[in-house]
Amino acid sequence: MRLCILIGCGLVALGGEELARADVTVIRAGHLIDTEAGRTLERQTIIVRDGLIAEVGGQAEAPAGAHLVDLRDYTVLPGLIDAHTHLTIDFHNQDPLAELQHTAAERALGSLPNARAVLLAGFTTVRDLSGRACSSPAPTSRSAAEPAPLPALPPT
């Protein structure tokens, strides 16, 4: 049976550009949380091909030329899910009218630091309950050539 888990910590450690360049990534995990079996596995290897987990196991071999990520001193766990978050809210701004002074696109772009913080905390899936501010960002003053400061996550 193929073990299907999100490796949030390992993939965040890769960074978006490296993940996009490497066809095969091998993550060496000191401990791996197996949520399907409800246990922690020791000294596991996770092989990621084209952004998808292809193999997990203690005996998995690293293909030649694979990008290696050494997490042998760490515990790797599935990506976490936050079912109630507000990415577009700036909790440091106490102005009750602040949300009304920005377009949905500006609020969406302003949510990138919150999205990055959530991702780096291990959450690979979120449900944003910020309301109308979640609409797709239209082009604004931000140049389309400027990449968003978020690591790329592979499809699951």
Image (cartoon, rainbow, N blue to C red):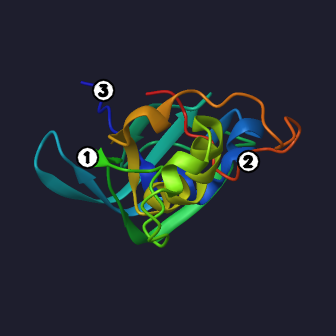
Image coordinates of residue 119 in percent, x first then y, are 47, 54
Name which of mark 1 and mark 3 comes first in the sequence.
3
Name which of mark 3 and mark 2 comes first in the sequence.
3
Q: Amino acid at mark 1?
A: His
Q: Which residue is rendered at x = 48% and y = 49% of the image?
A: 88
Q: Nearer the viewer, residue 44 or 82?
A: 82
Left or right relative to 142: residue 82: left
- Label 3 sits on residue: 2
Image coordinates of residue 10 in percent, x first then y, are 50, 55
Which secondary structure, mark 2? helix
Q: Amino acid at mark 2?
A: Glu
**Residue 144 marker:** none
Q: Quadrant of residue 128?
A: top left
Q: Which residue is rendered at x = 47% and y = 67% of the image?
A: 95
Q: Amino acid at mark 3?
A: Arg
Q: Quadrant of residue 1?
A: top left
- Label 1 sits on residue: 84
**Would residue 5 be seen by someone viewing this image from the given angle?**
yes
Q: Which residue is rendered at x = 59% and y = 49% of the image?
A: 101
In front: label 1 or label 2: 1
Image coordinates of residue 155 in percent, x first then y, are 50, 27
